[in-house]
Amino acid sequence: MVLLCPSDFSFMGKIELLNNPVTGMFFRTIDIPLDRQRKISAFKAFKRADEQLKNGRSMVIFPEGQIGNEYPPHLCDFKSGPFKLAIETKVDIIPVVIHNAWKICWDDAKQLGSRPGIVHIDVLPPISTTNLLLKDAEQLLGEVHALIKNHWNGTGGL
């Protein structure tokens, strides 16, 4: 993602990433941890993301909110929060399809390990939220999910 995003950005991700020695350093400083089990944590995380977007910083959010345990993986349902945030702040959504990272590093690398390789990523055209209202969030979520799923399945993602 660092190579794909030319501007300053932060990740929003699960609070467990604080425990990882690599990601923890970033999630304690520039990124935004989110505890999905605590509503106040989610509120604070999205408030912080809102402020960063309004200050011109980009946000990288994986809207699935989880990585499933199925092997091979499938695209999980999306959470609505990122879409509401995009509509509220009137920022474009740039869908990104990561095709084969799971083949290189399936788990946390402790059980199945990881191996060197090339991850194939497609950046799809931006989707404007300029004319959308909050009531459009679920429809936008569905459209983006279908777009990513069709692109992933249609180009050999699995």
Image (tube, grey):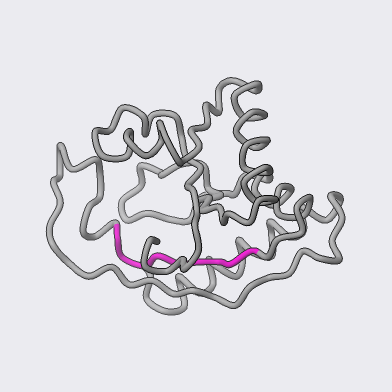
In the visual, does 128 lie left or right of 146?
right
Q: Residue at x 54, y 72 (%)?
A: 150
Above or below, 45 against 89 in this view is above
The x, y position of residue 134, in whole percent, is 84, 50
- 116 in magenta: no
Q: Residue furthest front?
A: 55
Q: Could you tell me which quadrant the C terminus lies in?
A: bottom left
Above or below, 72 against 68 in this view is below
**Region rendered in magenta:** 93-101
Above or below, 79 against 116 in this view is above
- 100 in magenta: yes
Q: Could you tell me which quadrant the N terminus lies in?
A: bottom left
Q: Residue 136: name its quadrant.
A: bottom right
Q: Residue at x 37, y 54 (%)?
A: 73
Q: Residue at x 46, y 34 (%)?
A: 14
Q: Residue at x 48, y 33 (%)?
A: 33
The x, y position of residue 122, in whole percent, is 44, 74
